[in-house]
């Protein structure tokens, strides 16, 4: 009986923790979306497909379609923080490490993950 009660308590606790971390994820993602719409939308566009209003003014280089980005998490964070030039790509992708706080970058990364394969690829 005692053992059963302990099991029940452990189960309840793990369910509660799961819910809490899901909520934390959601908060990060929605905050990330806000950060995105402030700093990234101009080039990458409201759908993150690389068709922002400012995209045409960049000349030959097109902002990436973030929905089909093949970068892994570390690579993505690197280009966001240190800019395109830091990874041998276009300097038209600016570095954001100074403008954004560590939390903003973390939440932005959480948001970008939700975009993956989630809708049209912009083609
Ligand atoms: C001034 C326009 C501009 C803004 C603003 C901008 N980007 Fe970019 N971004 C680019 C361009 C251009 C590229 C492509 C660079 C290249 O291909 O050499 C790019 C590439 C990227 C990539 C690489 C994707 C891949 O799969 O290769 C990521 C990730 C990215 N941007 C995220 C962001 C985020 C997050 C923000 C907002 C904090 C942002 N960008 C703001 C222009 C911009």
Image: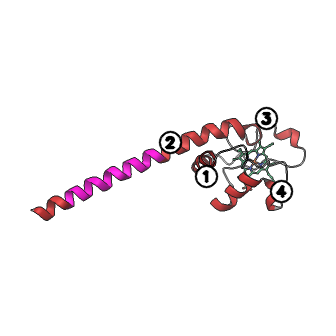
**Label 1 vs label 3: CA separation?**
22 Å
Residue matched to label 3? 53
Task: Please tell me how crowded label 1 is: few (under 14), some (14-19), or many (20+) other residues with Cα within 10 Å.
Answer: some
The extreme bottom residue here reads: 3
* N-terminal-most mark, 4 or 2: 2
Which scheme is used to colour this image of the protein? secondary structure
Asked if the beta carbon under badge 3 is closer than 8 A to the nearest atom of ligand 1, the reply is no
* Residue that label 1 marks: 116
Mark number displayed over residue 27: 2
Q: Which residues are magenta?
A: 7-24
Residue 18 is a magenta residue: yes
Quadrant, the N terminus: bottom left
Q: Residues within 10 Å of mark 2 (few under 14, many from 20)?
A: some
Q: CA distance from mark 1 to mark 4?
A: 24 Å
Disc 1 to disc 4: CB gap under 8 Å: no
Q: Is residue 9 magenta?
A: yes
Does residue 72 appear anywhere in the picture? no
- Are discs 3 and 4 less than 8 Å apart at CB? no
Label 2 or label 3, whichever lies nearer to me, is: 2
**Between tags 1 and 4, which lies in front?**
4
- Of helix, strand and loop, which one carries label 2? helix
Please tell me whether residue 75 is drawn above or below residue 109 in the rendered image: below
Look at the numbered discs 1 and 3 and tell me whether their residues touch, using CB distance below 8 Å. Answer: no
């Amino acid at each position: 009986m005692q053992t059963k009660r302990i099991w029940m308590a452990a189960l309840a606790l793990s369910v509660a923790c799961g819910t809490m971390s899901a909520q934390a994820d959601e908060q990060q993602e929605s905050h990330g979306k806000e950060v995105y719409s402030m700093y990234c939308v101009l080039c990458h566009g409201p759908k993150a497909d690389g068709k922002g209003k400012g995209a045409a003014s960049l000349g030959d280089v097109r902002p990436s379609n973030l929905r089909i980005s093949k970068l892994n998490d570390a690579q993505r964070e690197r280009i966001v923080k240190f800019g395109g030039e830091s990874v041998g790509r276009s300097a038209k992708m600016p570095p954001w490490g100074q403008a954004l706080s560590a939390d903003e970058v973390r939440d932005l990364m959480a948001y970008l993950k939700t975009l993956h394969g989630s809708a049209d690829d912009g083609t």
